[in-house]
Amino acid sequence: MTATNNSVNGTAPNDALSSPFIKALIQQIRGQDSYGFYRNWTDDLILKPFLVTKQKKREIPVDGDVDQATLARILTFYRSIAARVEQETGLLSQVVIDVNHEGFGWALVFAGRLLLVCKSLRDAHRFGFESLEKLSEEGEKLVEKAIDLAKRFPEVGNI
């Protein structure tokens, strides 16, 4: 994987690109790239669709169905959390995303019968983060909580 020193918005330090969650996110995106579309893309360019400023969010209409690219980004984000949980705990983790046509729904990450992440989604049309740091922070926060649950209740996660 290649990474540049600057993020998409030119302000992210290299440490945001090197966070375990961001690495897992990039790995998920590249892993789903069966045609090699992203082969020559830098990591920060691959992450660009996840970065949505407040101004850009206001410009995105919420009427109509959530587009497939946005749903794929949401799924990839939560699959990255599941991958990190698997790396840290060894528990096989799965993701379920249910979003209705209005952009409301749920994102669930579970292992066995243990629900590791349960996040309600609102305005899924506008899914994204203000900066690479915010993306990394949110992902790491959810990963830490999920790992804590997995370690506290391993018997439920192994079922």
Image (cartoon, helix red, strand yellow):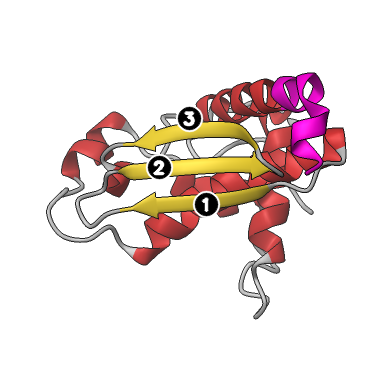
Q: Quadrant of the N terminus?
A: bottom right
Q: Measured from the top left, where is residue 91 in percent x and y?
A: 81, 42
Cα gap from disc 3 to disc 2, whole angstroms: 23 Å
Q: Residue at x 12, y 53 (%)?
A: 63
Q: Nearer the viewer, mark 3 or mark 2?
A: 2
Q: Amino acid at mark 1?
A: Val
Q: Residue at x 34, y 34 (%)?
A: 53
Circle 2 Cα neighbour tier, 10 Å, few/some/many (<14 / 14–19 / ≥20):
some
Tell me the residue that label 2 is attached to. 106
Tell me the residue that label 3 is attached to. 131
Cα gap from disc 1 to disc 3, whole angstroms: 25 Å
Instruction: Tell which circle, 3 or 2, labels the residue nearer the N-terminal end.
Output: 2
Cα gap from disc 1 to disc 2, whole angstroms: 8 Å
Q: Measured from the top left, where is residue 98 in percent x and y?
A: 39, 52
Q: Amino acid at mark 3?
A: Ser
Circle 1 Cα neighbour tier, 10 Å, few/some/many (<14 / 14–19 / ≥20):
some
Q: Residue at x 69, y 62 (%)?
A: 30
* Residue 65 to residue 59: above or below: below
The answer to whether any part of residue 29 appears in the image is yes
Tell me the residue that label 1 is attached to. 96
156 is within the stretch colored magenta: yes
Q: Which residues are magenta?
A: 147-159
Left or right, 114 with respect to 2, comes to: left
Front residue (pair 134, 114): 114
The answer to whether any part of residue 18 appears in the image is no
Q: Quadrant of the C terminus?
A: top right
